[in-house]
Image: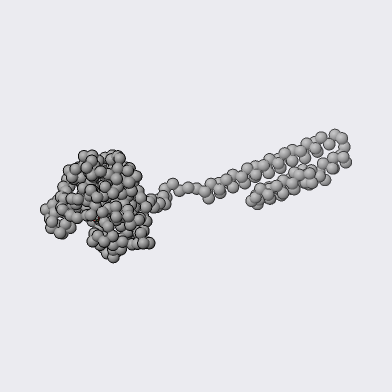
Amino acid sequence: MDLKKTIEKLEAALKEELEQVTTENELQNIKAKYVGKKAELTGLMKHMKDLPDDEKPAFGKTINEAKGRFTAMIEATKQTLHQRALDEKLRREKVDVTLDAPDYRLGTPHLLSQIVEELEDMFIGMGYEIKEGPEIETDQMNFENLNIPKDHPARDMQDSLYIGEETLLRTHTSPVQVRTMLEYGGTRPVKIICPGKVYRRDDDDATHSHQFMQIEGLVVDEVTTMSDLKGTLLEVAREMFGPDRQIRLRPSYFPFTEPSVEVDVTCANCDGAGCNICKHTGFIEILGAGMVNNNVLRSAGYDPERYQGFAFGIGVERIAMLKHDIEDIRNFYVNDLRFNSQFKR
Ligand code: FA5
C-alpha cells in the first residue's frame, strides 16, 4: 500500500467536500468520515503491525500529521460557515436608520375637555373648589330647591327628560350647587365650580344639542356683591377670549337669581366695532348669572340676612364655538378626527 498516495487521495476528496458544504450538520458528517474513529485514515493504522519496526514510527507520524491537517481544514471550514451565517443574519436584521419613522397618531384631549380644564385651572387659581354631582337628579334638586316649583312657568325654559315621576336627567349643573350648600349646612362659605354634562329635550340644530356641557359657579359668603360677580366674569372672558375683552351685563331673568343678568363679551373679531359674527352689535352673549335668590339660600339652610351669593352658568360648547369660530355644535359629538385633531393642546 502506498500510504502517501492514499492520504493524498483522501485529502483531495476532503477538500472537494469542504468546498460544497453549506451547513454545520453536513460538516459534522464530513468530520466523522475523514477523522472519526471509523474514518479510512484512522483505519490505516491497522497496517502498522505488518511493517518492520524501523518503518513504524514514520508510518504513524505520517498518519497523525494527516489527521492534524484534515482536522485543521475542517475547523477552518467551520469558522467560514459560522462567519457566513453571522453575515447573513446581520444582513437580514439590518436597520436602515435613514428610513422615515412610522407616523404615530398622537391623541389629544377633546376641545371641550380642554376648555373645561382651562377654566378649572383658572378657578382653582382663584380659590374655587371643583364639585361634581349625579347626572340623574331629583326634581327637588334640579328645580324645587332652585325656586322653580312644579307649576312655575320657568320650567318651560328648560325642557326636561324625566326618567320617573320625581327623577330626571339634570337640565343644568345648578343642582350641584344646591347639594353643596346642603352639605355645608348653612354654616360656612361656599366657593365652587361644577363642570359636567346636562340634558334637555331640545331639538338638535347648529346651536342646540340635547346633551351639552356646563360649568356653573357659586360663591356664598358674608360679603358678596354684584361687583365681585362682574370682576369674576371679566376674568373668565379674558381667559377665554383674550386680555383686551370687555364685558357687559344685561338684565335678565332666572328664578334662582335676583337680580339676574346675561353677560356679553366684546366681539373678538371686530373688537366691538360690529361685524357679521356679532350681528353688528359689537357683543356676543356668553353666559347667565346673578345674585343668588334669597329663597334658594333659605331652602339650603343659609340665612339671607347673613349670607349673600352670586352664581353663573357657562355653556362650554358655546364658548368653544365662539373661541374657534365653529359653526355647528354637532361637530363636537361625531368623533371626526379631521375636526378633533385641529385642536391640539
Ligand atoms: C342655565 O342653565 C342656568 N342654570 C345658568 C345660570 C346659573 C344662570 C347660575 C344664573 C345663575 P341657560 O338655560 O341659559 O341657563 O343655559 C346656560 C348656557 O347653556 C346657555 O348660555 C348656553 O350657552 C348653554 N345651552 C343652553 N341650552 C343649550 C343647548 N340645547 N345646547 C347647547 N348649549 C345650550
Quarter of the image for the N terminus: give it: top right
Q: How many marks?
A: 0
Answer whether residue 340 is visible to the viewer in this image.
no
Quarter location, residue 330: bottom left
Residue 22 pos. (x, y %): 64, 51
Q: Which residue is at a point 19% across and 43% down the rendered structure image?
A: 225
Question: Residue 281 or 224: which is nearer the viewer?
Answer: 224
Nearest the camera: 210 or 3?
Answer: 210
Q: Residue at x 68, y 44 (%)?
A: 74
Observer-nearest of 334 and 116: 116
Q: Is residue 42 above or below residue 340?
A: above
- Residue 123 appears in which quarter of the rendering? top left
Q: How is the image coloured?
A: one colour
| Picture residue at 74% right of the left edge, 46% below the top | 32
As drawn, the residue found furthest toward the left would be 273
Q: Position of residue 75 (x, y in %)?
A: 67, 42
Residue at left offset 80%, top offset 36%: 58
Give 323 or 171, whichever is nearer the viewer.
171
In percent of width and height, residue 332 lies at: 31, 58
Is residue 150 visible to us here? yes
Where in the image, quadrant-wise, is ligand 1 located? bottom left
Task: Name the spot of residue 252 as percent of width and height, x first.
Answer: 18, 54
